[in-house]
Image (cartoon, coloured by chain):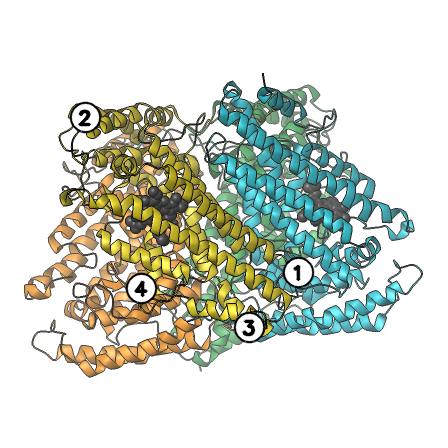
Chain colours: A orange, B green, C cyan, D yellow
Amino acid sequence: MANRQPHSATTPRVAAFDDWIRNRFIDLNSELEDLYEAQENRSQVAGVGDDLKQVLVDEGRELIVDLLEEGNTDEGFDRAFELLGNVGYYMAACRRHDITEPSRERTSPLAEASALAMHLGASLGTVPRFVSSHMETYNRSINGRYRTFTWRPAEKIFLDYNTRSALAYMRAADALGRIHPMGLSHPAANDLLVDARNALDDVLRLNTELADRLDVDEFFFCVRPYYKPYRVGSQEYRGANAGDFAAFNQVDMLLGLCLPTEAQYTQIVIEKIPYLTPDEQRRLHDSFRHPNLLDSLLEQREHAGEAWFRENAQAYLEVCAAHGAAAAHHHDELVARFITAPSTGIPPEFLEGITASGPPLDVLLRALEGLRDRRLAAPRDDIPTRHDDLVELRSLIAAP
Amino acid sequence: MANRQPHSATTPRVAAFDDWIRNRFIDLNSELEDLYEAQENRSQVAGVGDDLKQVLVDEGRELIVDLLEEGNTDEGFDRAFELLGNVGYYMAACRRHDITEPSRERTSPLAEASALAMHLGASLGTVPRFVSSHMETYNRSINGRYRTFTWRPAEKIFLDYNTRSALAYMRAADALGRIHPMGLSHPAANDLLVDARNALDDVLRLNTELADRLDVDEFFFCVRPYYKPYRVGSQEYRGANAGDFAAFNQVDMLLGLCLPTEAQYTQIVIEKIPYLTPDEQRRLHDSFRHPNLLDSLLEQREHAGEAWFRENAQAYLEVCAAHGAAAAHHHDELVARFITAPSTGIPPEFLEGITASGPPLDVLLRALEGLRDRRLAAPRDDIPTRHDDLVELRSLIAAP
Amino acid sequence: MANRQPHSATTPRVAAFDDWIRNRFIDLNSELEDLYEAQENRSQVAGVGDDLKQVLVDEGRELIVDLLEEGNTDEGFDRAFELLGNVGYYMAACRRHDITEPSRERTSPLAEASALAMHLGASLGTVPRFVSSHMETYNRSINGRYRTFTWRPAEKIFLDYNTRSALAYMRAADALGRIHPMGLSHPAANDLLVDARNALDDVLRLNTELADRLDVDEFFFCVRPYYKPYRVGSQEYRGANAGDFAAFNQVDMLLGLCLPTEAQYTQIVIEKIPYLTPDEQRRLHDSFRHPNLLDSLLEQREHAGEAWFRENAQAYLEVCAAHGAAAAHHHDELVARFITAPSTGIPPEFLEGITASGPPLDVLLRALEGLRDRRLAAPRDDIPTRHDDLVELRSLIAAP
Amino acid sequence: MANRQPHSATTPRVAAFDDWIRNRFIDLNSELEDLYEAQENRSQVAGVGDDLKQVLVDEGRELIVDLLEEGNTDEGFDRAFELLGNVGYYMAACRRHDITEPSRERTSPLAEASALAMHLGASLGTVPRFVSSHMETYNRSINGRYRTFTWRPAEKIFLDYNTRSALAYMRAADALGRIHPMGLSHPAANDLLVDARNALDDVLRLNTELADRLDVDEFFFCVRPYYKPYRVGSQEYRGANAGDFAAFNQVDMLLGLCLPTEAQYTQIVIEKIPYLTPDEQRRLHDSFRHPNLLDSLLEQREHAGEAWFRENAQAYLEVCAAHGAAAAHHHDELVARFITAPSTGIPPEFLEGITASGPPLDVLLRALEGLRDRRLAAPRDDIPTRHDDLVELRSLIAAP
Ligand code: HEM
Ligand code: HEM
């Protein structure tokens, strides 16, 4: 009866590389992590475990040479995107183990991996490196195990929660995105606002659990280093950010807390777009064209006395509150505890590249603070927030 | 501060027609409904209110002639799709009032409306008539009022619940559709299954409320007649079905309860595709290519002892149960009470075209029963259902 | 050095069926054609060669059952579309040999082929039957041989020229479609008009050669019968038309000789859309939204004295002349000699289904005449043509 | 009769800005060019014509502020893309007149223009600056005049020929791209190869005329400076290249002269992708997945004796020759005469940014030489070319 669907599309070479990434590769990285950990200064990577590193480089290259010869045989998005992820895992591990280092080189020494990654990225329309979707929503699990770099529990905890949180954001974005063609005064809009709020409440709950369960040092010394920038060919690509999915920004813009015509915000979003899957790229492009809910409510302020207005403005405000709370928690708990705090403890010469996107930590933190305050609609003089508009909205529906 | 976004894209002619559809048009239809209701045989429409009908035809045509002259000026999907809906409302009302009648004509006498509708449908890639999305998820509401044919409360009750129920199905489909790239054994899959089940529980709750609140006669005599088949140019298009959205079938196929390689089922889905928005068409095409969850679980039966298997198979079975329950309620309550029952009470010569899609009622009912039983995975000899596969799955996770 | 790219995507079952279609299947059809030809009445098919027919049905079914079991494994458009073509070839041959006959059945007796075809069509977004692109621009040739039904030279002659002519139309459509974003007064527009004219001249030349080389009887009795309507599941789909590609109508509308807001014309185009590849469907949708060249010239009549106007209006008129000439030749030579003439010689009971799209021959011919006259901008009272507008344009650029 | 289609989509503010760009803006730039020319050192721009520059900045900003307030109202690709072009023209002129200078600033002082450009770019999926398509294939002409920066004849000559040459490349790419689904041994493939060769011959002819007619100094001092890199917000975007269209690289890869799995080549293509229109981006992505003609011929070398092989291999070689000849002319004539030569004459401190893409001239020239030699299939030890494969192909079809 069953509709079998064997994965006939996967060639033996693709399967062999995938198998290597899912087993041997993780063993090698894990052994190297043990060596680093055994040292006084865990950040000291150069010169440690050189034989293991050589094995890693060579075994990976051999499999990649075979794939390059085979070419990209037009077998659908999923396969090509998974393969790009696998090549990217390999390149990122080489970067983590200091086998490659972008500031030291003008071109990646991983020539074959670069060629394959660029070939795949160009045919897919994404950057030619591994991105967050490879680790999360496109990280195909086999009997309960998805791809990781190491066997360390912290990595799995981090990814489990990140993925679940990203999916909750997607649910919120889907719900909010469906309001626009119906309008906020449509009787079904309330369901969508409530669904979005629930989803954003889930985000906060999940991120809070993550903060509880994730070991700071393990994360800082054994997980994050795999997410650093690296070169593909001669071009350096910034590291993978947990925030590299569209839904977060869709929520920002659909709620109207961040504006697609505000330069500083848009700059941040634009930078991110090539790091998304083509489908998410499209969703994000679209959300730059859609009206936002806050403007829409304020334009209808003459109907503030109507039941629909009071009810949906209230529901809208609750979505904003949930979005703001999750953003604040992210900034004030996750970033503070897992990045800022441990960064203070280590020698400055090892701090380089601490952030995935490149700028110095304090510049990054200030930018993140600005984002948080937009999402909180906090009163700020220096950057545009919707503080006053939310005040007006609240007063419009305050009991007379 | 606000990002204004006036709807500059809407031309004055488009706005004038929209205004007419949202006000005067509803008045005229409502007056005609009052006349029909005042008769002994409510089904008697011909020859009643002829002056009102003439006004309806003439006023609509005048506005449409202006629009035809203006042409379709490439202003984005939303505007063109809304306009197609408005032309369709007009044509459907003419059909309901027996001003046009497809079996009587070889070409629609509404020549200008036909030309405009075909022009829009061809440029959008949908059928050139109004479809369910026009009444539901794309029915833009202005200060709490979306487009309707009449002022009758039954129409609003029907649409409110239909829209909300359709949105709940979409949420279920989105959640299930995100499992496939991660695999069922991914730690995040459980959240998605739970979300899908909750959404399908919402469907049943909403449909139950609908059944409670909707007046049978009002629905049968004043609402459904607007959803009949009509001609656009020389081609007859079947009526609007509440089921004309992709999510329902996406859930069917993603769960694996209905199979994209089973002819009878696929035939039904194929017929529906042109009645969907382009975006929903694409989603549905895609779901024909994706593996289904039931096959995926059964192929991993050797891992039935694992925690992930027991947990997610259980969650999967609950999604199936919720989908089956909503489908059974739809068939056994909604169809039975609102279509089958009242149909028995009226003279046969008025029964023609009782169903939106054309086939005689008993044929339609048998087909719907088959769909219900697939969704219930009921034991059937005559059509393929997943009954035995679900039995196996249950036994796999039964406590030892 | 070479980038190998073996077709790893093709499964052994897909390859086996393709091989059968390219060899054994052609043998069987050819043998059957010999039997039919040997009779007094070549149109007599029923009851002739029943053993061969059984072999054809059985061998094909066996291969298709294997494929159905394998399912559609998401391996990219090309493979799925080719496979749909192969299934369609099989079903069309069964129709030609009277093994199936849509007016005799309510459901195709080719159950497995129907299921596979619907599955593929639904996932691709095209009708679930073989279409002209399968015979022409997507008919992959292996060492000089593409797929045919028979070994008869007439079939190859017909397809060679049809394909080449279709490609020439595509070149014309591409050129004309690139004018709109630049405007007709752009210095580069002339190159595009000239290229379009050259391409349309090629069409006429190729169609003229076709008329010279194609044997009327062979075409009428051994080629066309494979292009008849047939059922897939319970739905009947009209036959394959040589005109089922978008470029022809793109040229019509871009030139402005046929208008996307004229009901009769648009009806014809809409009917055709599902018989195109998704890419061509999109192109055709787009051309419904674009302004046409003739309106654009007339709106700029105040510049008729400018060099660009005179030059490009002249070039535009030459494109129209070439398009009209090819259309007239198609109607007055190809249709007249290869369809109308031989139809008169055969008994009426065998004339059923003479036209691919179903309507009686005289109705079809009248419609085709209308199309020809639009393309010729001939003076007609009964249908809208651009005769008067072309007269005006000519007078605008006539020497003073 | 005519299908009117007024450009209702264009808002008055969009029209006002377009009008300014098409008239006043050109006047101001032209006056500034006159001032620069009047100096001994034409490269001296700073401090010259400061009052005119201020007027340029202020008038432009005022119009842009209005547009920013209006937002992007989802009116289809063409309008948004044209508007992005207009904003980009303004920003590029400010760069040319040294009003902004990326190495001097961390953020563009043109804050409003930056915001609007980013908003538009993000919603379109292109870089937020003006690109070659704005100057060429999407440069809408009104009564014979398209957008330019100045009234200088050299600018028009350069753009006229560039546009025509780009269109000829597109025609070649379209033809070659249609071979792959049919295969090189299809009887229609020859027409496509011949069409491609003719189109590439046109390129050479047009580029030769360009070289004859274009004044070196005018081009170097008054045209190219408008194509320099500039910042949008804080990000610097490289300048507009005449080569920023997909067709050129499509031809490279479809012919197999450049390989999508060769890192150096792919790097160059990837860099270019965001500077293309979304439609061209998609075409280019696709061409990374398709087999190339040279590999395809060589894989069928056992059929070298067949007529189709000899004929199409010959035709293929002629396409390669035409592509190589045009590439060689571009490098050896256009680049040499219009860039390299005049660069030698001017003081080094004014040479900065001489190339649109940033690297020093000699590095760029070496890279361009490599591209030329790939296209010529020249014998090279240091970079991969198809020299040996073409030798083999020629020998395969040499008379015995
Ligand atoms: C023996 C040669 C041919 C014959 C007998 C023939 C016959 C016909 C017939 C009878 C139709 C009407 C189809 C229907 O609605 O049933 C038709 C339509 C069409 N044919 Fe042909 N055809 C021939 C060759 C070609 C060729 C070589 C082309 C160019 C590629 C072509 C292009 C078209 C087009 C574009 C239509 C669509 C109808 C329209 O829009 O006018 N045909 N042909
Ligand atoms: C005065 C005339 C021209 C000059 C001086 C010129 C100069 C250049 C230069 C310097 C580059 C390298 C760009 C960079 O990376 O900075 C380039 C690239 C390019 N140009 Fe031109 N160009 C001219 C005309 C044309 C024309 C008419 C075409 C054809 C449409 C063309 C097509 C290209 C292409 C396709 C590239 C991309 C580089 C490659 O892939 O080889 N150019 N041109």
Residue identifier under label 3: D301
Pair 1/3: label in front:
3
Q: Decide: marks 1, 2 in contact (CB < 8 A)? A: no
Circle 4 residues within 10 Å: few <14, some 14–19, many ≥20: many
Q: Work out whether disc 4 and disc 1 sit on a shared chain.
A: no
Image point (57%, 70%), residue name? A3
Farthest-out residue, right: C40
Q: CA distance from mark 4 to mark 2?
A: 46 Å
B248 or D167: nearer the eye?
D167
C71 or D156: nearer the eye?
D156
Residue identifier under label 1: B264
Circle 1 residues within 10 Å: few <14, some 14–19, many ≥20: many
B109 or C286: nearer the eye?
C286
Q: Decide: marks 4, 1 in contact (CB < 8 A)? A: no
Tag 4 secondary structure? loop
Image point (22%, 37%), residue name? D95
Residue identifier under label 2: D54
| Circle 2: residue type | Gln
Circle 3 residues within 10 Å: few <14, some 14–19, many ≥20: some
Residue identifier under label 4: A130
Circle 2 residues within 10 Å: few <14, some 14–19, many ≥20: few
Judging from the image, mark 3 belongs to the subunit labelled: D
Image point (87%, 67%), residue name? C35
In this rendering, does residue D176 appear at all? yes
Judging from the image, mark 2 belongs to the subunit labelled: D
In this rendering, does residue B243 appear at all? no
Q: Work out whether disc 1 and disc 3 sit on a shared chain.
A: no
Pair 4/3: label in front:
3
Find residue A216 and report its horizontal and vertical position in percent: 15, 67
A116 or A377: nearer the eye?
A116
Find residue A271 and report its horizontal and vertical position in percent: 27, 50
Tag 3 secondary structure? helix
